[in-house]
Amino acid sequence: MSLAVASPVRIGRLSIGALGILALALGTLQSVVEPALPQLQRELGVGPSEGALIGNTLLITGAVITPVAGKLGDRYGGKRVLVWLMAVVSAGGLLAGVAPNLPVLLLGQILQGVMVGALPLSFILVRKNLPARASQVAIGVVMALFTGGGMVGTLIAGPLSEKLSWHWMFALPTIAIIATTLVLTRLMPHDPPIASDDRIDWPGVVLLSGALLAFMIGLVRVTGDGLPPLAVVALTLLVAALATAWVVVERRAASPMVDLRMLAKPAMWHSCLLTLVVTTSFGMVAFLLPQMFAISADGYGFGLSTTDIGLFLLPGAIAGAVSDSVGGVVAGRFGLRAVLVGGAVVTAATTIALASLHTAAWQLVLAKALTAIAAGVAGTALLTRAAAAVDTGDTGIATSLLVVTRVIGVALGSQVGGAILDSGADSKTGLPTESAFVTGFVTAGLVAALSLLIVRITKIRSTKIRSTKNGAQA
């Protein structure tokens, strides 16, 4: 039975403005942790591995909620689900704003992670309530403001945490989210749900979340506490069991969270594997640089405050935002193989050079910008390739699979970086030694160089990305 499709209802600029401000506040809340991570570690009395969990728990929640957010919006209405998610995000932000210790802060970060689902829901609302051309402009505004929020968060984390306390860098954006959500509730018209027989894959969501969290926490415990062999074996078996159960559920689900059968396409599993490698390397760099900025200047570090770290990280954030937006264009001009090889060479050369050249702050700033550009262009090019390699109706599934892989890669990289610093900590001070950073930079370079081998083995062609009539890659 076909349902009549209602014509779009023109919504006012105030509604679009509210969506944009919400995206700005969400981007800010998501990004305040990176420059403030060394300060959080000091004030919470935790090491780099546990500190990496603060950002990673948010990423993990985002990875598992993104594939189901759109389905929830279609089934129950985009506005209703967006308000639900913002209630969860607000609870997480307020919890982080009063957190007395690491476990409470991690719980707040887990709840905040559902913010990633706000973007597809915002797009649903815009497309349902605006004509096609106007909706494209509105989507661009929302995305731009979300990216801008990331830069705002990088800049305000220091002043808020140093002048007030680190709790305020979570609380202030959360207050803005609550206020904007209340405005949206009044201004945005309700969108009718779409009848569907597809079930939400909640078992898949739970199993993937459990597997990722168990892996991250297990890595912290192994590197930080020196667990006995039996405990290491038990953790390994737990992660393997959860991951295996997730694969079984996804293969049998009528409407899986991630359609693993799509990985049978060479273009898909090639893209996923390369995305994982590229983002793992970048995740290591993104974690290691703020840590080195914060190390006392009496040794090999710079002793920078959270405010200064945010300023030094800003060029890299801008470079990453720009490269994310042009990756598909660059791949279309020069070819996917050239983009991947170039990105791998730039990242490997930059990180290996950092192993010996890290005595000036500009060297770290330049390294962050170069690796962000390489990862952004390569990641977007692989996303474009995956979208072009499947039928039009499968574009959402394919891109969500790449997005999940991308998030997992960044989280894995930062957690490995934290583990390397923890394992190389000085026994007297408890701080990472310079050799630990050198090991981390070299490891990131070797991981980036691994993508060169993958490109060669998978025989990715040098032809440019373009779409044919059936949507496959040429």
Image (cartoon, rainbow, N blue to C red):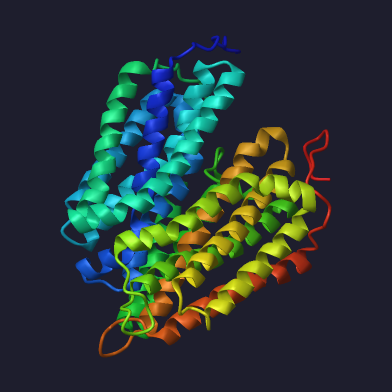
Please indicate whether residue 282 sits to the left or right of residue 377 in the image.
left
Q: Give the farthest residue toward the bottom.
A: 428
Q: Quadrant of residue 234?
A: bottom left
Q: Position of residue 412 (x, y in %)?
A: 48, 65
Q: Nearer the viewer, residue 409 or 444?
A: 444
Q: Quadrant of residue 73?
A: top left
Residue in the image at 33% along x and 83% along y: 226
Q: Position of residue 184 (x, y in %)?
A: 34, 23
Please indicate whether residue 236 sits to the left or right of residue 376 in the image.
left
Whether residue 244 is visible here, answered yes or no, is no
Residue in the image at 60% along x and 51% along y: 323
Give the answer, above or below, for where 272 lies relative to 10: below
Give the answer, above or below, for where 74 lies relative to 11: below
Q: Position of residue 471 (x, y in %)?
A: 77, 37
Q: Nearer the viewer, residue 306 or 402?
A: 306
Q: Nearer the viewer, residue 255 or 447?
A: 447
Whether residue 302 is visible here, answered yes or no, is yes
Residue in the image at 50% along x and 54% along y: 407
Q: Position of residue 151 (x, y in %)?
A: 42, 48
Give the answer, above or below, for where 439 lies relative to 250: below
Identify the image quadrant of the C terminus.
top right
Identify the image quadrant of the N terminus.
top right
Give the answer, above or below, for where 96 lies relative to 298: above
Q: Quadrant of residue 242?
A: bottom left
How many marks on residues?
0
